[in-house]
């Protein structure tokens, strides 16, 4: 990734993965250390049920040439690792992004390790 592109991304210090109730289900969002949402997954309900069988190899993550990509009903997210950072770009379509953040790769992995453990501990 060219350094000029990286300049558009804001550091998300204290990165966490937060579960929350949405309707009768559980959803998930990425937050910074101050509890501000940096990205969400608006169409993914029952997330804890899905995550119970995941390992770190399953989490949303790609590389600069093949980022993780998800797109659904006016929502789009790209996530990729590059040189010790994980970049998260969220937008409303395939061409424009309104949330651009990066997190240290070890923080991203640690947050996912915690989230997977938390999902496994939640009642079915």
Image: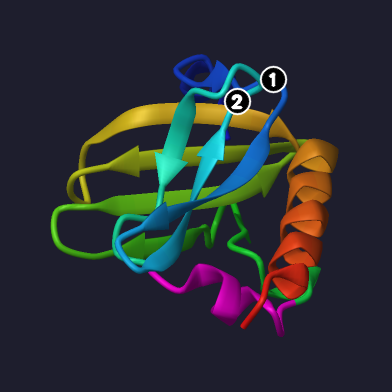
State the image quarter where residue 60 is shown: bottom right
Taking the image as shown, residue 23 lies to the left or right of residue 26, namely left
Residue 100 x/y as whole percent: 43, 28
Q: Which residues are magenta?
A: 45-54
Q: Secondary structure at mark 2?
A: loop
- Vertically, is 65 above or below 111? below
114 to 97, vertically: above or below = below
Asked whether, in this view, residue 108 is left or right of residue 69, the answer is right
**Number of on-image labels:** 2
Q: Residues within 10 Å of mark 1 (few under 14, many from 20)?
A: some
Element under disc 1: loop
Q: Residues within 10 Å of mark 2 (few under 14, many from 20)?
A: some
Residue 59 drawn above or below residue 30: below
Q: Position of residue 116 (x, y in %)?
A: 74, 65
What's the residue at 31%, 55% (across, down)? 42
Q: Is residue 89 magenta?
A: no
Above or below, comparing residue 122 to residue 83 in the picture: below
**Numbered badge on residue 32:** 2
Of labels 1 and 2, earlier in sequence is 1
Would you say the residues marked 1 and 2 are in contact, meaning their CB atoms lie under 8 Å apart? yes
Q: Residue 23: horizontal and vertical position, in percent?
A: 30, 61
Which residue is the site of mark 1?
13
Q: Examine the structure image and report whether residue 48 is included in the region drawn in magenta.
A: yes
Inter-mark Cα distance, 1 to 2? 6 Å
Q: Which mark is residue 85?
A: none
């Amino acid at each position: 990734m060219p350094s000029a592109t990286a300049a558009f991304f804001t550091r998300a210090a204290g990165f966490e993965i937060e579960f929350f109730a949405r309707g009768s289900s559980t959803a998930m969002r990425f937050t910074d250390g101050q509890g501000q949402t940096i990205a969400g997954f608006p169409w993914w309900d029952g997330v804890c049920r899905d995550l119970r069988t995941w390992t770190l190899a399953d989490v949303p993550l790609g590389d600069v040439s093949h980022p993780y990509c998800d797109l659904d009903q006016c929502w789009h997210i790209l996530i990729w690792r590059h040189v010790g950072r994980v970049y998260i770009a969220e937008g409303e379509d395939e061409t424009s992004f309104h949330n651009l953040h990066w997190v240290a790769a070890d923080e991203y992995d640690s947050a996912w390790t915690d989230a997977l453990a938390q999902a496994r501990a939640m009642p079915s």
